[in-house]
């Protein structure tokens, strides 16, 4: 497959300079579950030239209803490996950096300082890691787009894109806002959330790391929609940067 084959339809829409700008871009995506897997594929198919993907998890049977990496043939495989192989087959010209790591607040600074991406996408579940990534990206003036809760919901028309500090209804967004406020952060983080009141989860269950977590019900399309929306936010901004570059030249 040639690069031309990948970009032909995209170039009709965004022009040659838009395709070139996407090819020059570097996006770091943390989390390859129900949201992040679809975000990764959208970025790869759009022709992003450099992707740093971060995940530590393996495919499990309970992922089959919503996660791109999950099939009957990929059980117990690393999501990072499955998604990496898929993207390499879709866009072999993309430079893929696969980081097999559970992000912690202590490991995030080194990752961001080593990669210095044009954009960061947060699609991780761990609350401490999520808040740490958001805060440390803001400290470095790296644009970041974050997924709030996609579980427990059915209505695709209730998605909202906006500043995280304007989010409503979503319990995860409320807790993320609270923790960021406590650390002195205000506006400037793009988020995707739902205004649908989530259905109650099952009682918390033990996890391999950290405290027991509640188990949310999920549906096939909602996490995917969150992920595609995050990718769209980033791609549109990168294309806007290309327009600004042309206007300055």
Image: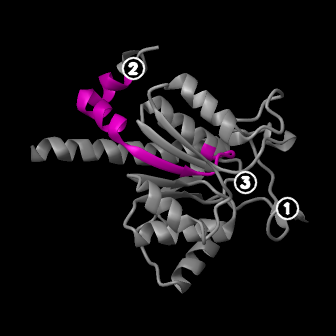
Alpha-carbon distance for marks 2 and 1?
42 Å
Res 207 label? 1
Whether 82 is drawn above or below 231: the answer is above
Residue at 45% x, 47% y is 27
Residue at 24% x, 42% y is 242
Number of residues whose C-alpha sits closer than 10 Å to that of mark 2, classed few (under 14), some (14–19) or many (20 or more): few
Tell me which label, 2 or 1, sits earlier in the chain. Answer: 2
Q: Residue 59: percent from the left, percent from the top?
A: 79, 41
Alpha-carbon distance for marks 2 and 3?
36 Å
**Nearest to viewer (mark 3 / mark 1):** 1
Tell me which label, 2 or 3, sits earlier in the chain. Answer: 2
Viewer-side residue, 8 vs 57: 57
**Nearest to viewer (mark 2 / mark 3):** 2
Left or right of 234 in this view: 65 = right
Viewer-side residue, 136 vs 224: 136
Magenta segment's dominant SS is: helix
Q: Quadrant of residue 173?
A: bottom right
Res 151 label? 3
Residue where numbered disc 2 is placed: 3
Q: Residue 201: percent from the left, percent from the top?
A: 83, 61
Whether 171 is drawn above or below 98: the answer is below
Q: Quadrant of the C terminus?
A: top left
The residue lying furthest to the left in this view is 249
Q: Residue 74: percent from the left, percent from the top?
A: 79, 31
Please say which color scheme the image uses. one colour
Residue bounds of the magenta highlight: 9-36
Q: Quadrant of residue 83?
A: top right
């Amino acid at each position: 497959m040639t690069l031309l084959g990948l970009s032909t339809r995209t170039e009709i829409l965004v022009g040659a300079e838009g395709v070139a700008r996407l090819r020059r871009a570097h996006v770091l995506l943390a989390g390859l579950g129900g949201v992040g897997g679809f975000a990764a594929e959208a970025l790869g198919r759009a022709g992003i030239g450099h992707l740093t993907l971060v995940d530590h998890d393996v495919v499990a049977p309970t992922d089959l209803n919503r996660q791109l990496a999950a099939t009957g043939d990929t059980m117990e495989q690393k999501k990072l490996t499955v998604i990496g192989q898929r993207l390499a087959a879709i866009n072999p010209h993309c430079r893929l950096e696969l980081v097999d790591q559970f992000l912690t607040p202590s490991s995030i600074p080194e990752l961001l300082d080593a990669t210095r991406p044009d954009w960061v996408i947060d699609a991780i579940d761990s609350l401490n890691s999520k808040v740490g990534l958001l805060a440390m990206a803001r400290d470095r003036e790296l644009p970041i787009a974050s997924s709030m809760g996609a579980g427990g919901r059915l209505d695709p028309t209730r998605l909202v894109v906006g500043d995280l500090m304007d989010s409503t209804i979503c319990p995860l967004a409320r807790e993320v806002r609270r923790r960021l406020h406590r650390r002195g952060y205000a506006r400037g983080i793009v988020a995707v959330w739902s205004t649908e009141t989530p259905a109650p989860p099952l009682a918390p269950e033990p996890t391999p790391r950290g405290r027991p977590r509640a188990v949310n019900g999920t549906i096939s399309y909602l996490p995917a929609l969150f992920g595609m929306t995050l990718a769209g936010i980033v791609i549109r901004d990168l294309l806007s940067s290309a327009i600004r570059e042309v206007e300055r030249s």
